[in-house]
């Protein structure tokens, strides 16, 4: 007998979780003009005219609409910039973020 014992090495499997995507949500209000909402959706979120109109009308009718989905920091930056664009004109336009399920 050699006295050498083979001990199996413990394997540590590093599980990196994929960062959760975040939805940007547009909320309706009674004051922001429709065409301004559409302009912000086109400029900040790069939506085409038809998609921007559809998102704006969905928020207008239902109270809120998902605009797009991004990595968390991108979603937060875009939501803040779009909300600020409304505030700069005195509108209560609001965009918010929430994690996707
Ligand atoms: N409800 C607004 C109006 O009638 C238009 C509007 C639509 C405002 C969607 C915000 O997220 C919004 N002028």
Image (tube, rainbow, N blue to C red):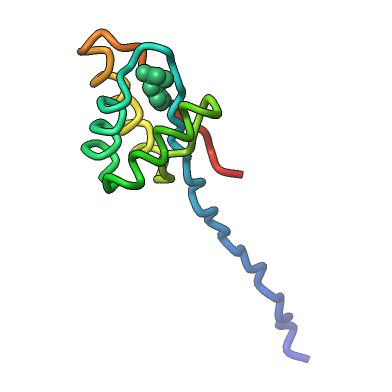
User: Which quadrant, please, contains the C terminus?
Assistant: top right
Q: Position of residue 20 (x, y in %)?
A: 51, 46
**Left or right: where does residue 87 sit relative to residue 12?**
left
Q: Residue at x 30, y 19 (%)?
A: 33
Residue in front for this viewpoint, 8 or 78: 78
Q: Residue furthest bottom?
A: 1
**Left or right: where does residue 72 sit relative to residue 15?**
left
Q: Residue at x 23, y 32 (%)?
A: 39
Q: Residue at x 74, y 83 (%)?
A: 3
Q: Residue furthest right?
A: 1
Q: Residue furthest top?
A: 90
**Left or right: where does residue 99 sit relative to residue 5?**
left
Q: Is residue 57 above or below residue 49?
A: above
Q: Is residue 14 above or below residue 1?
A: above
User: Which quadrant, please, contains the N terminus?
Assistant: bottom right
Q: Quadrant of ligand 1?
A: top left
Q: Position of residue 45 (x, y in %)?
A: 29, 41
Q: Position of residue 37 (x, y in %)?
A: 31, 27
- Can residue 80 be seen here? The reply is yes
Q: Position of residue 62 (x, y in %)?
A: 55, 29
Q: Is residue 42 above or below residue 90?
A: below
Residue in front for this viewpoint, 86 or 71: 86
Q: Is residue 82 above or below residue 55?
A: above
**Left or right: where does residue 9 sit relative to residue 29?**
right
User: Which quarter of the picture shows residue 34?
Assistant: top left
- Can residue 94 be seen here? The reply is no
Say how many tags the image has: 0
């Amino acid at each position: 007998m050699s006295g050498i014992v083979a001990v199996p090495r413990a394997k540590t499997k590093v599980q990196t979780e994929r960062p959760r995507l975040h939805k940007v949500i547009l909320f309706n209000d009674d004051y922001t003009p429709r065409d301004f909402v559409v302009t912000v959706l086109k400029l900040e979120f790069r939506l085409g005219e038809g998609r921007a109109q559809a998102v704006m009308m969905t928020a207008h009718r239902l109270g809120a609409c998902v605009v797009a989905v991004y990595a968390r920091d991108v979603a937060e930056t875009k939501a803040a910039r779009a909300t600020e664009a409304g505030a700069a004109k005195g509108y209560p336009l609001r965009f918010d973020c929430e994690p996707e399920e």
